[in-house]
Amino acid sequence: MSSIAVPAKLLTVVQLIPALHSGGAERSALEIARALVQAGHRSIVISAGGRLVEQLQAEGSEHVALDLGRKSLRTLFQLGPLRRVLREIGPDIVHARSRLPAWLGWWALKGMTPRPHFVTTVHGLNSPGSYSAILMRGERVIAVSQPLRDYVLSHYRWLEPSRVRVIPRGIDPVAFPYGHRPDEAWSKAFFAEYPMLAGAPLLTLPARGTRLKGHHDAIELLADLKRRGIEVRLLLLGVIEPGREAYVTELRELARARGVTSQVAMSPPRGDIRDVYAISALVLQLSNQPESFGRTVIEALSLCRPVLGYAHGGVGELLAELYPAGRVPPGDRERLVERAAELLRVAPPIPPLQSYRLVDMQQATLALYEEVTAG
């Protein structure tokens, strides 16, 4: 991966995000924090904490623990502490990556002299309205895909198009090397942990434990393939999270009702996702609402693993550009099982990925920071 250029002016950048457990927004926050440190800037993330804090700090950033994302009136009591922290830090830029932290950040900056620049990122296709509109108040508004930029401009007609910049997420090809295969020790340990996944092609759906991510569709796909005499296994990677116990129970009940309990495994988020992708016959992206981007698509394709997904939103855009054979109309269960069977039989070749690199995303974001502070 190319190195991050050292700028003429060093900045202090604070990123606001609800927590640092898992998810695309959280990973982007870490990736930009890493780039800031590499360029000599001061990088601070304010969140409620989570499993990624250790990595954030190990890579040279600072973390301040404030719960800015809990959807409760009590969260308003964090406004005073946030304002005090920001005054102590004196940042050049406050970059908000979620709606409630953005509102708190916006209010906290009122009256600050000098006032830090306010930047926002729209990570998802949020319901338009006054609550979501705070993410359009940034001096620059980053959209993670062209469909997302089109979406926000169509719903917020007052938003100047020149303030909305498309900076797609990217992956590190060193972290997801083309043709990677895990070593024997890893494979042995993985199948010892999940013995039900051995002995047949593996379908992997990497997604958080939320109904929008298509876990039900993945279980139905497994059952449909089984009815056709096609034996596969399914891993719902990342579905087990604190507070999602009822949802996981619901998925287990569906698997039992469809007769596929012994072919399904569910896991919490894992740090060895590269190796899991590499042993997967298909990586699934079945969100039942359009995604703003679809990082898992480029991660899997970078490893030379086929992707099967619904052709809408950012996922549809990526598949159309990078792997058209993996596109299926959203919610079309018959086409989904047909395409899965085709790809399991003979998947079209996947060329090495030449775009959507992590360093491109990092450099574009740091250039935007420099642009904002130079104005």
Image (tube, rainbow, N blue to C red):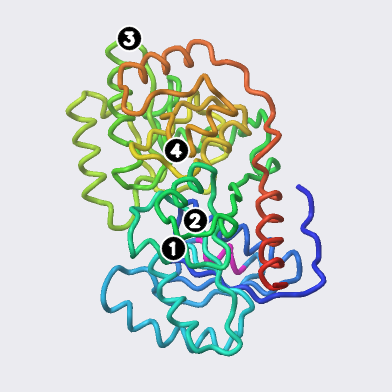
Mark 4–mark 3 distance (CA, rounded to whole Å): 32 Å
Q: Say whether marks 4 and 1 touch (CB < 8 Å).
A: no
Looking at numbered disc 3 in the image, what kind of residue is underneath it?
Gly
Residue named by callout 2 = 25
The tag on residue 229 is: 3
Looking at numbered disc 4 in the image, what kind of residue is underneath it?
Gly
Residue named by callout 4 = 313
Residues packed near mark 3 inside 10 Å, few (<14), some (14 to 19) or many (20 plus): few
**Residue in the image at 67% along x and 32% along y:** 353
**Residue in the image at 19% along x and 36% along y:** 253
Secondary structure beneath dot 1 equals loop
Q: Disc 4 vs disc 3: which is toward the camera?
A: 4
Mark 1–mark 3 distance (CA, rounded to whole Å): 45 Å
Secondary structure beneath dot 4 equals helix
- Pick whichever of labels 4 and 1 is earlier in the sequence: 1
Q: Magenta-highlighted stretch: main secondary structure?
A: helix
Query: Which of 163 and 272 lies nearest the eye of the viewer?
Result: 163
Residues packed near mark 2 inside 10 Å, few (<14), some (14 to 19) or many (20 plus): many
